[in-house]
Amino acid sequence: MKKIGVALLGLGVVGGGTYEILTTKREYIKENDGLDIEVKAVLERNLDRVRELGIDEALVAKDIDEIVSNPDIHVVAEFFGGVEPARSFLIKALENGKSIVTANKEMFSKSWKDLEEAGKKGNAGLYFEASCVGGVPIIRTLTDAMQGNKMTSLKGIVNGTTNYILSRMSDEGVDYNTCLKSAQDLGYAEANPTADVDGFDSMYKNSILSSLAYKKRVPLDKIYREGISSVDVRDLEIGKELGYTMKLLAISKDDGKMTEARVHPAFLPAEHPLSAVKGSFNAVFIHGDNVDDVMLYGRGAGSLPTGSAIVSDIVFAGKNTTHRRFAFEDVEVDDSSFATDFITEYYLRFAVSNQGEALSKITALIEDNGVSVERAMTKGDDVIVVTSKSNESKMQAIVRVIERLSAVDCLGALVRIER
Amino acid sequence: MKKIGVALLGLGVVGGGTYEILTTKREYIKENDGLDIEVKAVLERNLDRVRELGIDEALVAKDIDEIVSNPDIHVVAEFFGGVEPARSFLIKALENGKSIVTANKEMFSKSWKDLEEAGKKGNAGLYFEASCVGGVPIIRTLTDAMQGNKMTSLKGIVNGTTNYILSRMSDEGVDYNTCLKSAQDLGYAEANPTADVDGFDSMYKNSILSSLAYKKRVPLDKIYREGISSVDVRDLEIGKELGYTMKLLAISKDDGKMTEARVHPAFLPAEHPLSAVKGSFNAVFIHGDNVDDVMLYGRGAGSLPTGSAIVSDIVFAGKNTTHRRFAFEDVEVDDSSFATDFITEYYLRFAVSNQGEALSKITALIEDNGVSVERAMTKGDDVIVVTSKSNESKMQAIVRVIERLSAVDCLGALVRIER
């Protein structure tokens, strides 16, 4: 039986989950996949954690060089998070012929090109199923199930923390700060929640998934990003009355020439399958020209669900004799093939001082600019307008003009509507 | 570049879709997967269809022997449907070293063991992603993404025809026969709809998916089967009031020792993700001990979605130098490891002649037999009861006793409730 030696870099939540699965499922994987996978080394300073997991202290490596020079190690799985030292360590591993497995979306989305190069040099593979949507095989689907499709769009709830917060705000009518606090208390959000609530995490994942979908590097600086920290619970409630559910979405589209990619809170029709994705669950909707819509749903985080994807990748990395190369990572990014603007429908809420005339003036201004108004209503001191499709830049310009109307105080909310 | 020759057996809906994708995506697949896939032969008597698809008539083979003896053909994709001659032709292909690709769930579920043997003999692979849930990569997920999981349950809407009929019945309050007729008019149901509406199609798929999930042969005769032809629209309406949606489900569970598998209409809570799967869409919910719940959703049928899965399998079959073997197909089925009974909750409707006392007598009888009544109500001439969990055999026995009550005319409906 083929023996695969694994090194685990870091024994945090997912590192620990991975060790647990590799241990409890060792015989099962031998039986079903014909691989004997053994943890041969760990890189972890916290010896209490090593002991807590029941790992032999003799396996603790003194540094990355000890790991990459060990011929019994074939796969290096990384759980540090953050860009460095993960990036340098994994490049070393690849150059030394060790395939890498990682859940680190920030590092991966920022370093894919360099990792690819190192992998080519060392004839080793890059495996990152766990970097997007935990245990859900979205990467496998894009790389190994859609070969006969030109993918045209992707839309996903790829961050559990923000989905938990928005679900609670919507279900219980509680404001953002209260929900964030409770997410932090429950361990769903970090003490510094920026990566999640400001959409960075979703942006990293959007970059990875869109690159795979369109076979084209979609760099972070081409992705529009907006988080949920200024979402007003009032708009979730009004949205609900109008038949919408608010989600933080990672969206991208590609028509074969131009690509657009963005992360922002958006309204979805309540009957859209993504609207039913609640709490810390994640889901990704993809559209291919032949397969039509496909959705994958599951746990986007957690030690065992993410560990499950890591272990699947270790099996893949161990079985494969030739490793998949991502050729698009070699191609220079062509700036002109990325949209700087996008088209969508809009929900607008304005605080107004003169309810008598505000609605008609606002809607007239929108229609004068060639955008249809689908719905308009006065609600207390606010005017709500739902528009048909418009360019984002045009809508922003219209909003600036509306804000100068004497009957209008300011923009209360602008939420894009996706279908 | 590696050249892969393909033979298409039959040019029906999916065969035609596959030819279309292989033609339009030939360059795309060359570029991304490094394979040049060419259709080298077709086996189709209808020459009009051959011309309609723009296929060179010189590619029409005179028989299967011409195909299996052609060294330029590496993969044989089958679109006949039905057991014979598909089965014999594919066994011949495998024995001659041609990998097979099929969407034929009936043939595959009935012949897997023999195909496996032939594949071993000829060192060729079995690829059947398209046999279950069209373009949705559920087979890929079970074989290549869950290696670190013991799967414990599976629950799916795997037949589009019945889901279309039940969705229409539920949305429009129209009876079964009217909906079946309109499904037939729209081409969603066959003139002879038995395979779909009586649950055979779902049973075949349940056998394939459950075998893969539990790595254990789950033969057709171990699967309880009940179709939708006697579903009364009234129960969909009452169910809706109670917060349930009715779906024809393929269900299986495995605790490591015992397996149960069944196909029948069932109520799901309206908030269950499967309840939102409407019309001809399909979805499968799987549960692994580490990954937790995962759901895959998409088009379960149609020329291009199913063709998309066929093409993905052709790419796989063409790339793989060693083919996956399904060792469990060699193992004799151990009858004692299959449950002959199952446990679930029940919705019961009885037609009664004496509304005054029927409800109390029915509920008393149920509770006397050790099953709790969660809800009971009188509705016109009917009494509706929702129970807690019970063995199916016990519940059937209770129902027989209730039917003998003088206040009760007969059982109107028995619907299992799943969560």
Image (tube, coloured by chain):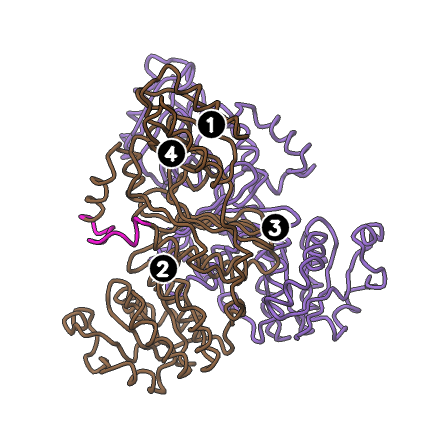
Chain colours: A purple, B brown
Q: Residue flagged by tag 3: what amino acid is it?
A: Asp
Q: Which mark is residue A54?
A: none
Q: Evaluate if marks 3 and 1 touch, with contact meaning CB atoms under 8 Å apart.
A: no
Question: Which mark lies nearer to you, 3 or 1?
Answer: 3
Which of the two residues, B269 or A84, is positioned nearer the viewer here? B269
Residue lying at 39% horizontally and 20% vertically, measured from the top left: B358
Q: Is residue A156 left or right of residue B404?
A: right
Q: Is residue B58 above or below residue B323?
A: below
Residue A100's image quarter? bottom right
Per the rendered image, the range of residues in magenta is B185-198
Q: Assign a secondary structure to mark 3.
A: loop
Could you say which quadrant of the image residue B19 lies in?
A: bottom left
- Is B383 magenta? The answer is no
Residue A239 rendering spot, x and y as whole percentages: 42, 27
Real-space CA distance between mark 3 and mark 2, rounded to the nearest whole angstrom:
40 Å
Query: What residue does disc 3 label?
Result: B289
Residue with the most extreme left position: B48
Mark 2 or mark 1: which is in front?
1
* Mark 4 to mark 1 CA distance (whole Å): 14 Å
Residue behind mark 2: A256
* Image quarter in which the C terminus of chain A is found: top left
Q: Would you say residue B197 sits in the magenta stretch?
A: yes
Distance from the alpha carbon under mark 3 to that under mark 1: 35 Å
Please give the residue where the numbered disc 1 appears in the rendered image: A236
Is label 1 in a helix, a strand or a loop?
helix
Q: Of the two numbered discs 4 and 1 on the same chain, state the one appearing first in sequence.
A: 1
Do the residues marked 4 and 1 share a common chain? yes
Disc 2 and disc 1: Cα gap in Å? Answer: 35 Å
Question: Looking at the picture, do discs 3 and 4 lie on one chain?
Answer: no
| Residue A346, numbered label | 4
Q: CA distance from mark 3 to mark 4?
A: 42 Å
Front residue of A390 and A94: A94
